């Protein structure tokens, strides 16, 4: 039956993977809010033009694009930053700056599926709008690091600066389409192709690219003296980007975040124009996220100039890493309230107990059954830690029986007593 299959590049999240997915989202939101970020929720579908204007070659080719019934060209979002900027221009321009936003969203790209890469995938992102200083970039990265530390992901950052490349290419008269193509080739590690293409565009550019790709962080200032005549009136901009890169990496390392410079990191999104970075794990050699500055992306959509920076984490890749890790997704007490199916009064007591447990902060579910033994068997297999039993004996004596499904011990108490505290105090794992 074709219809019960799922499309290639998608997947069902069930059992522990689904719990892990929820846990990662909850922890990301909590960490973002603790660091001063506020939520934003944008549409899953947008006008195609929103992403086509400044997303880069690869994303343009991999978008899911379709026409609606009115003939408008729409796309499933391939990423969220463009949507955030659109929302800012529509509704948030009058807010005090910097504006700090977070999101958790599904995205879609028609790419070849591989380990940790799906056509439907989840991102957790952070964006800061209206702050020109490197402090904004540090705020984003430190928040991401706090989250990754919380969930137990050992990681480090590799940092580049696409602004250095763009300054030289603009100075040499290279148009934006050619700039984007050269950076795309470098991003995909097709260095020889990038050299050949740049030589056709401008013979001098090949030598500049060779220097940019070979210099370490401490050598970057040599670019200023060596290419002063080429950059001319952009010397100040070049100096600022070099300083920003050095300061960013030095400050990250000073606050205990491992960061190294990689001159070949340019990333595929065309809107990045300064510092960029990827987050790598020490467990698997894959990138689990990345970001950078995209100042003036607002101008692409007809808005005023504005500073902005942000990043996104790939939650699917994080799940891939954590699936084998000894992480407890649903710790604590989980109660099944078992009611013998003998009338409304017994159900009323059961629902009253469930509500008391919820108010006490405990997870609890009610189940009406014909046989208590079957319900207890189900509760043990389904991962419940405790059962609250209301059978015929309990109903007649106005009591409830509390059973610890781990230790198999149980106690009966009057129905009116504070059941939540009793479960927590006397029915814990060691009871």
Image (cartoon, rainbow, N blue to C red):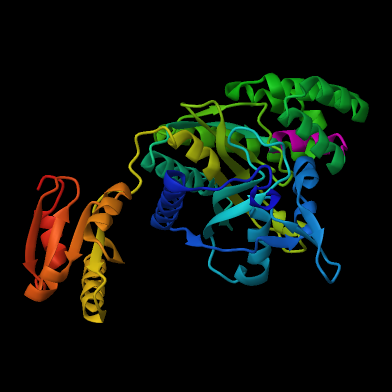
Task: Residue 148: name its quadrant.
Answer: top left
Who is closer to the viewer here, 58 or 62? 62
* Residue 183 x/y as whole percent: 76, 34
Labels in figure, total? 0
Residue shown at the point (40%, 43%) measured from the top left = 146
Lateral position of residue 116 relative to residue 295, left or right = left
Can residue 386 be seen?
Answer: yes
Q: Residue at x 23, y 68 (%)?
A: 340
**Above or below — where is 360 with respect to 147?**
below
- Which range is magenta? 163-174
Q: Position of residue 354 (x, y in %)?
A: 25, 69
Work out whether residue 397 or residue 151 is closer to the camera in this orientation and state it: 397
Q: Quick check: is 371 in the magenta stretch?
A: no
Is residue 238 at all visible to an observer of this figure?
no
Is 170 covered by the magenta stretch? yes
Q: Nearer the viewer, residue 13 or 1?
A: 1
Residue 240 in which image quadrant: top right
Outermost residue on the front side: it is 370
| Residue 219 x/y as whole percent | 62, 21
Report x, y in % for residue 306.
66, 58
108 relative to 256, above or below = below
User: Farthest residue in the bottom direction?
Assistant: 345
Q: Residue at x 81, y 26 (%)?
A: 194
Magenta segment's dominant SS is helix
Q: To which quarter of the image does residue 403 belong?
A: bottom left
> Vertical placement of 356 versus 292: above or below?
below
């Amino acid at each position: 039956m074709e219809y019960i299959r799922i499309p290639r590049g998608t997947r069902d999240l069930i059992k522990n993977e689904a719990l892990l997915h929820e846990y990662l989202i909850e922890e990301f939101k909590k960490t973002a809010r603790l660091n001063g970020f506020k939520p934003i929720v944008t549409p899953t579908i947008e006008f195609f033009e929103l992403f086509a204007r400044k997303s880069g070659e690869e994303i343009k080719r991999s978008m899911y694009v379709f026409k609606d019934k009115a003939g408008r060209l729409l796309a499933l979002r391939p990423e969220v930053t463009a949507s955030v900027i659109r929302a800012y221009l529509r509704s948030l321009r009058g807010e005090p700056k910097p504006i700090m936003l977070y999101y958790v969203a599904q995205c879609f790209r028609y790419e070849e599926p591989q380990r940790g890469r799906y056509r439907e995938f989840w991102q957790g992102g952070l964006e800061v709008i209206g702050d020109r200083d490197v402090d904004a970039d540090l705020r984003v990265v430190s928040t991401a690091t706090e989250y990754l530390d919380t969930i137990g992901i050992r990681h480090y950052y590799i940092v580049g600066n696409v602004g250095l490349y763009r300054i030289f290419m603009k100075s040499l008269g290279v148009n934006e389409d050619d700039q984007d193509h050269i950076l795309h080739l470098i991003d995909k590690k097709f260095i020889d192709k990038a050299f050949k293409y740049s030589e056709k565009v401008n013979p001098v550019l090949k030598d500049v690219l060779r220097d940019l790709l070979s210099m370490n962080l401490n050598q970057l200032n040599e670019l200023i003296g060596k290419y002063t005549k080429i950059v001319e009136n952009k010397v100040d901009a070049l100096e600022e980007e070099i300083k920003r890169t050095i300061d960013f990496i030095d400050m990250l390392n000073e606050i205990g975040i491992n960061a190294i410079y990689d001159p070949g990191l340019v990333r595929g999104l065309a809107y990045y124009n300064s510092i960029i970075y990827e987050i790598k794990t020490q467990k698997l050699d894959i990138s689990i996220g990345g970001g950078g500055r995209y100042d003036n992306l607002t101008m692409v959509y007809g808005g005023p100039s504005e500073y902005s920076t942000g990043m996104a984490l790939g939650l699917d890749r994080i799940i891939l890493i954590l699936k084998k890790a000894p992480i407890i997704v649903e710790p604590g007490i989980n109660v099944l309230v078992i009611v013998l199916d003998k009338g409304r009064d017994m159900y009323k007591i059961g629902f009253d107990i469930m509500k008391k447990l919820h108010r006490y902060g405990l997870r609890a579910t009610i189940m009406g059954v014909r046989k208590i033994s079957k319900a207890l068997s189900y509760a043990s297999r389904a991962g419940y830690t405790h059962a609250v039993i209301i059978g015929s004996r309990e109903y007649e004596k106005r009591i409830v029986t509390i059973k610890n499904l781990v230790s198999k011990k149980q106690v009966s108490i009057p129905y009116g007593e504070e059941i939540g505290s009793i479960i927590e105090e006397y029915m814990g794992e060691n009871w």
